[in-house]
Image: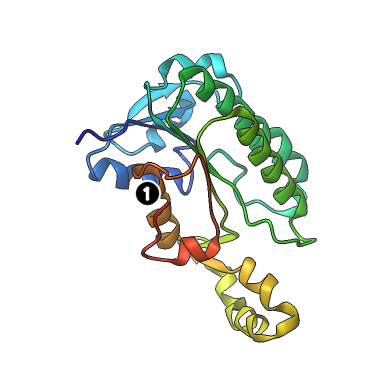
Amino acid sequence: MAKDPIFVAGGTGYIGKRVIKILLNEGHVVTALAREQSVKKLPEGCKVVIGSPFEAASFADSIPADCVFVHLVGVAHPGPKKKEQFYSIDLASLKVSVEAAKQAKVKHFVYMSVAQSPTKVMRDYQEARRQGEEFVLASGLPSTFIRPWYIVGPGHYWPLLFQPMFKLLEIIPKTSAKAKALALVSLKQMLRTLNTIVTNSPKEINNIAEIPDIKNPNYKP
C-alpha cells in the first residue's frame, strides 16, 4: 500500500527534524520547507523546498498532491516575554500554511497547537494557537490539532524539577483538573503521537489529540 507523501513546515526545529528522521526511516517521502540558510539542519534524505513560511507563493506549488501537511513553525523556547512573536510568527505562519495547503488540496492538515486549559502564565501563547485552530477549521481542511503543554526532552529537562509538585496538584480536588490538563509529556511520547497521526488517515474530518492521548501508547486518531 502506497504511503501518503508528507510536507513539513518547521522541519528544522526541535520537533520537526526528529519526526522527519522517523518518517524517513519508515519509508515515507518527506518534503520540508526551509530557508536557504537553514537547509543543513534538515535530516539527510528529505526533499527540500527553499522558501519562506510567511510567503505562500514561495512554496505552495511544491506541496505534493494529496499529501499530509504538518505545520510545526513556532517561536523557539516560548515564554511570556515573546507575546508579540506568538502572533507575528506562530499565527502568521500558520495562516500562510493553510492558504498554501488549500491551494494544493492537501489530504490532511496537522497542526501543533497547545493545551487550552486556562493559565495566566502563557495565555497569549494559548490564544494565538487557539486562533490558529479556528483559522484551520474555517478553511474546511481535514485536520488534526495536537495539544501538548510542555515537552520534556534534551535541553528541556528543567520542568522535571517541578514534577513532584505537579503530582501533588493532581490529587488535590481543587487543582486536579487543571494540573492534569497541563501535564508534562516526553519528547518520545510527542514524536510517537505525531508519527501516528501523520501516518494514519483520520476517521473524522477534524480531530484533537489532548495530553492524555499523547501519553497513551495505544492512541489512534
Q: How is the image coloured?
A: rainbow
Residue at x-position 76% and y-position 49%: 124
Q: Nearer the viewer, residue 190 or 109?
A: 109
Q: Nearer the viewer, residue 11 or 213?
A: 213
**Residue 156 versus residue 124 in the image, above or below:** below
Residue that protrudes farthest toward the left in the picture: 1
**Residue 183 versus residue 205 in the image, above or below:** below
Q: Nearer the viewer, residue 129 or 76?
A: 129
Residue 80 percent location from the top left of the image:
75, 53
**Residue 164 versus residue 66 in the image, above or below:** below
Quarter occupied by residue 211: bottom right
**Residue 59 visible somewhere in the drawing:** no
Residue that protrudes farthest toward the right in the picture: 120
Quarter occupied by residue 25: top left
Residue type, numbered disc 1:
Asn
Compared across the picture, whether 193 is left or right of 205 comes to: left
Residue 13 percent location from the top left of the image:
48, 43
From the image, tell me which residue sits under label 1.
195
Compared across the picture, whether 191 is left or right of 131 comes to: left
Compared across the picture, whether 214 is left or right of 42 comes to: right
Q: Secondary structure at mark 1?
A: helix
Residue 189 percent location from the top left of the image:
42, 62
Residue at x-position 42% and y-position 44%: 202
Quadrant containing the N terminus is: top left
